[in-house]
């Protein structure tokens, strides 16, 4: 069980790194890092498959307590959340590449702040997992409200923008970007809730 937990945290660290790279590409317009999330994703997917297989084997052969089964079940759901965040990081890098020829949009600083909040949520959820901290796990839902509010505000600004000159592709790409960030935050929230379930046995 300890090895499984270590593998999940290793996967989490790789996803955090991928998130940082996509943030750098999108908001610092640094295309030197665009390959990194794709390279990391291979390691993330490999760990994902390994952890799912190990959880299934452990449940079938070794898990003898309700607590063990609860933990293994939560791990299997949790790594799916991590894998999805890694996929969204790749999508954001692709958006960064497509946005690069266009001038920076005025909303980029606000979107960057939204991204930083989502990254913080992921970090808190992984620390909660490492410490099996139910309180921290549940607290992430409050942080998610900040990201949700930012998404709604930015969506209205982008979609109802009146003074668009030229192509609308940058607007469409930024709408996609904030949607991806909102979903990444949702997955981080899921991780925190799964930590609370591991500790308490109560689904949030």
Image (cartoon, rainbow, N blue to C red):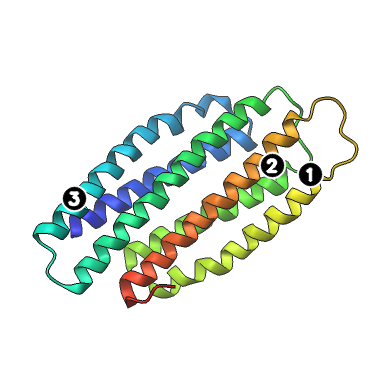
Tag 1, which secondary structure?
Answer: helix
Give me the disc on residue 175: 2
- Mark 3 surroundings within 10 Å by alpha-carbon count, few (fewer than 14), some (14 through 19), many (20 or more): some
Q: Residues within 10 Å of mark 1 (few under 14, many from 20)?
A: few
202 vs 184: above or below: below
Residue 183 in the figure: left or right of residue 67: right
Number of marks in picture: 3
Crowding around mark 2 (Cα neighbors within 10 Å: few <14, some 14 to 19, many 20+) is: some
Which label sits on residue 159? 1
Report the quarter where the N terminus lies.
bottom left
Numbered disc 3: secondary structure: helix
Residue 167 falls left or right of residue 188: right
Q: Nearer the viewer, residue 192 or 19?
A: 192
Q: Secondary structure at mark 2?
A: helix
Alpha carbon separation for disc pair 1 and 2: 8 Å
- The answer to which image quadrant residue 31 occupies is top right
Give coordinates of residue 85: x percent, y percent.
47, 46
Indicate the position of residue 62 as horizontal and vertical percent values: 10, 61
């Amino acid at each position: 069980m300890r090895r499984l937990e270590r593998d999940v945290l290793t996967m989490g660290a790789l996803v955090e790194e991928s998130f940082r790279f996509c943030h750098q590409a999108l908001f610092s317009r640094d295309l030197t890092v665009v390959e990194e999330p794709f390279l990391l994703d291979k390691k993330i997917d490999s760990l994902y498959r390994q952890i799912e297989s190990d959880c299934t084997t452990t449940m079938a052969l070794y898990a003898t307590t309700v607590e063990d089964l609860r933990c293994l079940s939560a791990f299997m759901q949790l790594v799916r959340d991590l894998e999805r965040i890694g996929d969204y990081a790749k999508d954001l890098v692709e958006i960064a590449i497509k946005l690069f020829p266009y001038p920076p949009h005025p909303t980029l600083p606000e979107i960057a702040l939204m991204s930083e909040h989502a990254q913080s949520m992921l970090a808190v959820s992984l620390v909660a997992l490492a410490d099996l901290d139910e309180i921290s796990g549940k607290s992430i839902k409050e942080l998610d409200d900040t990201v949700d509010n930012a998404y709604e505000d930015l969506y209205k600004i982008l979609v109802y923008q009146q003074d668009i000159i030229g192509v609308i592709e940058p607007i469409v790409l930024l709408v996609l970007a904030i949607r991806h960030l909102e979903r990444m935050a949702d997955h981080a929230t899921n991780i925190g809730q799964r930590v609370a379930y591991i500790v308490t046995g109560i689904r949030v």
